[in-house]
Image (tube, rainbow, N blue to C red):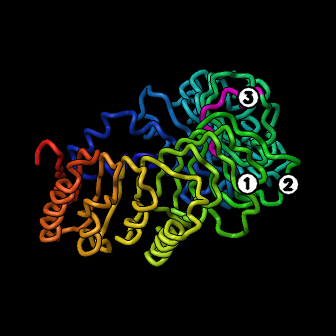
Amino acid sequence: MDTGVPSRKLALVSKHWKQLILGLPRLWSKVEVDMTTQHPPEVILDWLKRRLRHARDVNLDVVIINTSKSFWIDNSHYLNLFKTLVKLGPVERWHSLQICDYHSDDPLILNEVLTGKFSSLRVLIIVYDTWQTRPGMHSDLVRLAVHSRPSLKHLGLYTDQLPINLEPLFQQQAITTFSGRVKTFHMLPQDFLANLREVRLDCAHSGWFKPNAPKALPQCRATITNFSPWAVTTIDARNVTMLHISVALNSGVFLAPFELPNLHTLHLSPCVPQLLEVFNAPKVQVLKLSRAHEGGKSRSLKMVRHDHKALAHLLFQKTRQLLTIYPISVTIDVMGITNTTLLVMLEAWPQLKHLSIVLDDSFECFGIFAKRWRDQKSPLFPNLETMYMEVDWHTNGRKWNRWKVLAKEMMLASKDLPLRSIIWRNSWFGVESITQNNM
């Protein structure tokens, strides 16, 4: 039951922490009813009662998971759980509801248990299998949500078909965020899309889906997970102003560029340099390249260095004039970056005004880097105004002191340039900065 903030674990730190945690009901407001657990029903029921008691009268974030039931627990135990949930935490207090319903052999019917209306519900996320034809737990919960007509802000549909008639929900102008699979996105009415300000799409598990034409995203912030050449053929992102590619699949060949004429901010995690060639985004001003996780694990240093080499090669090659991305603000939050990659990037993008970067021990800020940085005849950053560096050098005090000297030399070399400040931070040595005023 300790989802979200690990309140149960924090309460075990000390007696003082326990009293503090128990006095903050918001830390206990996320309630998960997991039917996949192998714990005895009495234990689950006791956890649920205690958590709802600690939550007091605050609104609840409810997560219901029904993937595969324990073989010794029948539906009567789960109905008892729901009776306790709606008694101690009435549906009128539910702020968000996430339903993961994958089990249809013996569906759980909740009509007799659910009473009241979702008057406080703001977030509704539904995940269920498309082969599930029998009405189940999700049907009863969604039916009550439609009947309650709550003022939803976020609607999530992670399924390949609409569960029931959601027309009353689609008519709400209060919904500004949609998340779900691409096929479900194609089923949404156009009037509903016009009110959205944020869209989060998952392109996985739908590779066989071939629409007649790409579906146009509204003018919004968009996040695309499992981005691939197939996704380009199903999504029209010409109206998108902010785009985050959270996972990019390297399989397949992009047959056409991804047109993003109104894009202002692009965030790639992981940093996949090849996508910079695919995106036709001439108005991008902010570019973020972040570290990523695959399968819950960080990418290996070998993979990261491969991406850095690819980025350096892409920006260094003579065909880089084909690139349409020329940002004025760049943030690089990846490990293992080398001085060669950074130098090539700064030379390829002389229009940069703001640079924020994370460096570790694999970055050597001296030698050719320092020499090139001090060059006043051919400035490396003719338009750079601010520079922020997160340097992960642990206890290397000598390197930290040498960096302070280099930062001062960099600022002296830039006295006739727009550079105003250099800030660098280290978890061991704190934060230091140098500006033109404190030289």
Q: Nearer the viewer, residue 29 or 257?
A: 257
* Res 11 visible: no
Magenta stretch: give its range: 191-200
Q: Residue 414, how many percent across, how many down?
A: 23, 52
Q: Is residue 362 highlighted in magenta?
A: no
Q: CA distance from mark 1 to mark 3?
A: 22 Å
Left or right placement of residue 291 versus residue 129 in this view: left
| Count of numbered marks | 3
User: Residue visible at 75% across and 40% down?
Assistant: 216
Q: Which residue corresponds to mark 2?
A: 210
Task: Name the amino acid type tagged 1.
Answer: Val
Going from N to C along the chain, the mark reached first, 2 or 1, is: 2
Task: Name the amino acid type tagged 2.
Answer: Lys
Q: Is residue 192 highlighted in magenta?
A: yes
Going from N to C along the chain, the mark reached first, 2 or 3, is: 3
Q: Which residue corresponds to mark 1?
A: 232
Instruction: Give the residue at the far front of this rendering.
Output: 377
Q: Which residue corresponds to mark 3?
A: 192
Circle 1 or circle 3, nearest the eye: 1
User: Residue visible at 46% across and 68% down?
Assistant: 298
Instruction: Count neighbours of disc 2 (C-alpha within 10 A) and say few if under 14, some if 14 to 19, many if 20 or more.
Output: few
Left or right placement of residue 308 versus residue 190 in this view: left
With respect to residue 106, does 139 lie above or below?
A: above
Q: Nearer the viewer, residue 389 or 20?
A: 389
Query: Is there CB contact under 8 Å for labels 2 and 1?
Result: no
Q: CA distance from mark 2 to mark 3?
A: 22 Å
Going from N to C along the chain, the mark reached first, 1 or 3, is: 3
Secondary element at tag 1: helix
Q: Residue 63, how many percent across, how many down?
A: 57, 43
